[in-house]
Image (cartoon, helix red, strand yellow):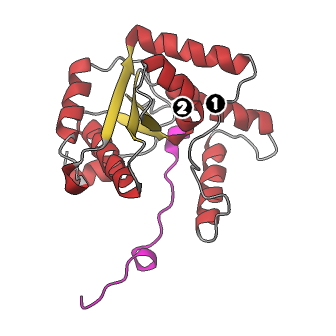
Amino acid sequence: MTVTEAIETRITTRAFLDTPVSGDVLRRILDIARRAPSGGNLQPWHVWVLGGDEMVRFKALIRQRMEAGMLGDGIEYEIYPPKLKEPYRSRRFKCGEDLYATIDIAREDKQGRLAQFSRNFEFFGAPAAFFFFLDRTMGPPQWSDVGMFMQSIALLAREQGLHTCPQEAWAAWYQTVAEFFAVPAELMLFCGMGIGYMDESNPVNSLRTDRAPLEEIATFVGI
């Protein structure tokens, strides 16, 4: 698979098969992803890998807390700016509408939408997952490094016939995640990511989000 093919076939997968993913494959993906760009070679990423019986135990803990009425632990950073301006607001709105349309959940079906959103906290059925942390002393440039590390993982996963689902939604459970893994206090949870084999029969995976045309995002000077 070429890099172009990996980029063009990568999607945010929201329904996985329960087929296990080899620990050796996950280790190889992470080992290669270490070559992701990093300003000053700080390599600010820290990653916890979850699967097997511990995945079952972790999901049971989250389910138990949600059934008790917990919506999370709060949040340490704004996933989206509180007042999105255009065109970003419309892009986000359309993404949500297109997503729920694939599984026939109407806009007024608040319960159905909440149930689908809650599947984030089951990794959409993925058999393995990553949690990405960075030191609290780091700033926006290092957050971008972690993003490039995650993108490298997503593309390497495609090379292995796997798909991924980056999930900033896990930031809402930052304390629970940190406690479960006994993460040092100086590290901050940024994002989760489910990884596994895509359930191609599930209509939710038919979603292909729009991208702005090149002319809208790129300015060429002297070329």
The correct choice, above or below, for 116 with respect to 108 in the image is above
Of all residues shown, which one is farthest toward the bottom?
222
Residue 172: percent from left, percent from top: 60, 35
Q: Is residue 10 left or right of residue 111?
A: left
**What distance separates the C-alpha of mark 1 from that of mark 2?**
7 Å
| Secondary structure beneath label 2 | helix
Residue placed at 37% from the left, 36% from the top?
163
Q: Position of residue 61 (x, y in %)?
A: 58, 14
Asked if marks 1 and 2 touch (Cβ < 8 Å), the reply is yes
x%, y% of residue 58? 51, 15
User: Any mark on residue 73, and which?
Assistant: 1
Quick check: 199 left or right of 7? right
Query: Is residue 191 something that shows in the picture?
Result: no
Choose the circle earlier in sequence order: 1 or 2: 1
Q: Which residue lies at the image location 63% right of the left edge and 30% below the top edge? A: 73
Q: Nearer the viewer, residue 140 or 156?
A: 140
Specify whether 100 is left or right of 134.
right
Callout 1: helix, strand or loop?
loop
Please tell me which residue is depicted at 51% across the width and 55% down the height of the picture: 209
- Horizontally, is 104 left or right of 208 in the view? right
Q: Amino acid at mark 1?
A: Asp
Magenta stretch: residue 212 in it?
yes
The answer to whether 153 is drawn above or below residue 219 in the figure is above
Location of mark 2 (residue): 174
Q: Measuring 44% from the left and 23% from the top, which residue is drawn there?
A: 17
173 or 104: nearer the eye? 173
Q: Quadrant of the C terminus?
A: bottom left
- The reply to whether residue 212 is visible in this rendering is yes
On whether residue 142 falls in the magenta region, the answer is no
- What amino acid is at disc 2? Tyr
Give, as a single range, the part of the protein colored magenta.
203-223
